[in-house]
């Protein structure tokens, strides 16, 4: 068994604290840090005052393609892609920085639960890495939106340019989507 560096362990704990504060689920913490499950549980309980939520992580790519989640996922992925290409960050650091920038763009109460959680954002990046999803360019606005990797994208129209009839009924939803549209386009 190799020696553990105190500095490495401190870095892992700091990363876990940041992830928990951003709303990460225990499975994400286990995957991105080398800390034991017991330590992560103690850390989570100490920070949040409650046990972490139980259950499986979301796995379906379909959630990211529905109207409102697609806009939020697309905004996040465009930020993430930019950071990877221009800011020399990668891995969980890129996800955390992109998620913080995504949160800055969301109007409203910062304590309100966001459409795209950190765990979903992390899962989304994994779907992109496994080539299940990709960004498609909208033929009308030119924005890049999350879509299935092998769909036909020649005449792709995004959810903002080709809004479903049931979408946008709430004033708050319209304001959020307008802000997201301005950022993606």
Image (spheres, rainbow, N blue to C red):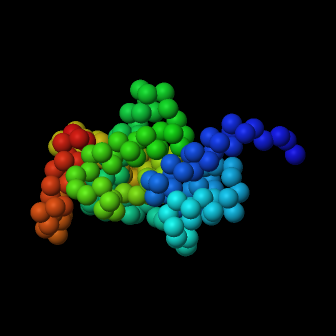
Q: Nearer the viewer, residue 158 or 70?
A: 70
Outermost residue toward the bottom?
A: 55
Seen in the picture, residue 155 relative to 45 is either above or below; the reply is: above
Number of numbered discs overlaid on the protein picture: 0
Seen in the picture, residue 1 relative to 177 is either above or below; the reply is: above
The residue positioned 62% from the left and 40% from the top of the image is 11
Quarter-of-image position of residue 9: top right
Outermost residue toward the right?
A: 1
Q: Nearer the viewer, residue 114 or 168?
A: 114
Residue 49 drawn at (x, y percent): 51, 67
The residue positioned 56% from the left and 62% from the top of the image is 46
Report the side of 172 relative to 110 (left or right): left
Report the side of 126 relative to 142 (left or right): right
Q: Nearer the viewer, residue 175 or 64?
A: 175
Quarter-of-image position of residue 39: bottom right
Q: Is residue 135 visible?
A: no
Residue 55 drawn at (x, y percent): 55, 73
Report the side of 152 relative to 124 (left or right): left
Residue 165 drawn at (x, y percent): 14, 67
Quarter-of-image position of residue 67: bottom left
The residue positioned 13% from the left and 67% from the top of the image is 169
The residue positioned 50% from the left and 48% from the top of the image is 18
Q: Is residue 41 visible?
A: yes
Q: Quadrant of the C terminus?
A: top left
Residue 95 drawn at (x, y percent): 47, 44
């Amino acid at each position: 068994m190799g020696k553990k560096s105190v500095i490495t362990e401190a870095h892992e704990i700091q990363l876990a604290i940041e992830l928990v504060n951003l709303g990460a689920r225990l499975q994400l913490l286990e995957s991105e840090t080398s800390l034991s499950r017991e330590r992560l549980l103690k850390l989570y309980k100490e920070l949040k005052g409650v046990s972490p939520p139980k259950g499986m992580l979301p796995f379906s790519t379909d959630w990211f393609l529905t109207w409102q989640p697609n806009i939020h996922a697309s905004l996040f992925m465009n930020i993430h892609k930019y950071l990877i290409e221009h800011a020399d960050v990668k891995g969980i650091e890129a996800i955390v920085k992109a998620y913080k920038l995504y949160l800055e763009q969301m109007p409203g109460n910062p304590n309100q639960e966001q459409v795209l959680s950190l765990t979903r954002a992390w899962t989304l990046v994994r779907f992109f890495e496994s080539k299940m999803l990709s960004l498609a360019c909208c033929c009308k606005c030119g924005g890049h939106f999350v879509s299935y990797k092998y769909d036909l994208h020649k005449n792709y129209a995004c959810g903002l340019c080709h809004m479903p009839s049931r979408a946008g009924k709430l004033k708050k939803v319209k304001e959020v989507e307008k802000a997201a549209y301005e950022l993606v386009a």
